[in-house]
Image (cartoon, rainbow, N blue to C red):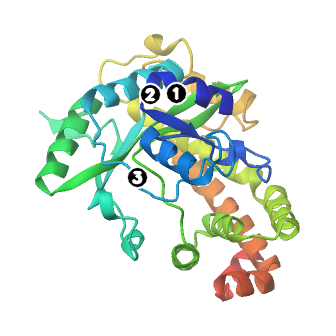
Amino acid sequence: MQRLGRQLDKKLYPYSFIPRGGLSSPYVEYVSDIDLIFAHSDCNDKQKKGSGKGRNSSKGSKIHNPYATTHTFTKPEFQRLLDTAQGLFQGGHIMSMQITAEDDLTNSSSAGASESEPSELFDGELHSTTKESDGKIVTVKLDPVEIFENASYASARKSLGIDAVVVSGCYRWREYLIPMDISLKRGEKNMTHGERVTKYKKNLEDKNFAKAVQRCRGAMKNKDQKWDFACCWNYYGGKSRFLYKQLGMLGSLCESSSGPGMSESESSGDITDSALSTTKLVEYCKRTLGLPKSVERENLGSWLGVAEEEMQCNGAKVLWEFRGYLKTLMGVEVGKSVEQWSI
């Protein structure tokens, strides 16, 4: 997958691939999603001059100045991103997009600036909420180019600059469809330990224990301890997180294919054709995911809820098992809620 990322450098110039995520980590056994991240080449060039390392080395790929370029996203660059995504995603189907902006982009690496969160100009599915027209429910398909143009206009009015654009779909990997994000970024911030602890506390408060596990793993410097922690999560929660991601992806595909004029016959091809038929959904869930035939469009949300609950319980088990070490590492007690969920 890293080779694929580097192959896309030419298509997405002046952005270049940065190895990140589960596919680049030896600690992840079950790859539940794919992140292909591309940062503006000015950031990589300045980083290479400062470190003396090549772009493809693990150290040289880190960007210490989060916005080392004053480059502004252009419509042709966004169109190249769309073309690339549609060529990679199954059925050429883009399920969702995210566009964020940051104020004072050229100076955001100064002390304290990294504490601010980027503003979200758009974050959602490309099928909008349904509208009522003459008593009928109509699903509106949103135009990604129009969304980008509106975001650019909104960011200019607020004296912001678009710092990241993410498009999401699903990628065929062997017999599986894997959720994939392709991101263009002006740069990449290295999260401080304080920021990580703050997010970790919020994850615990929200009972998002699976995400809290990821926060902890990223903070660990001791390789042996990190390996033990990762193995514990892979054993308890790796498969449940994979299933949760799969069901979430299938739910998005179902919702995006619920518009008018989409019949069963039109969706007789691949699972990611213009419409996701019930037949194809049941077949994928049974043959690929090993789920019973009872999984259907109508109860997919219930199955997703069960998978999430199992994933969070498994996350709580891991946090509780390593509670002593995590208190020292993160400076936070995991709390009784974790113990209750871990039982």
Q: Residue at x 49, y 22 (%)?
A: 10
Is residue 30 toward the left or the right of residue 66 in the image? Answer: right
Does residue 48 show up? yes
Q: CA distance from mark 2 to mark 3?
A: 18 Å
Q: Secondary structure at mark 2?
A: helix
- Residue holding disc 3: 68
| Residue 238 in the image: above or below residue 81 | below
- Residue holding disc 1: 9
Q: Position of residue 148 (x, y in %)?
A: 25, 37
What is the crowding at mark 1: few (fewer than 14 residues within 10 Å), some, or many (at least 20)?
some
Dot 1 amino acid type: Asp
Q: Position of residue 154 (x, y in %)?
A: 16, 49
Do the CB atoms of the residues marked 1 and 2 lie less than 8 Å apart? yes
Q: Secondary structure at mark 3?
A: loop
Q: CA distance from mark 1 to mark 2?
A: 5 Å
What is the crowding at mark 3: few (fewer than 14 residues within 10 Å), some, or many (at least 20)?
many
Dot 2 amino acid type: Leu
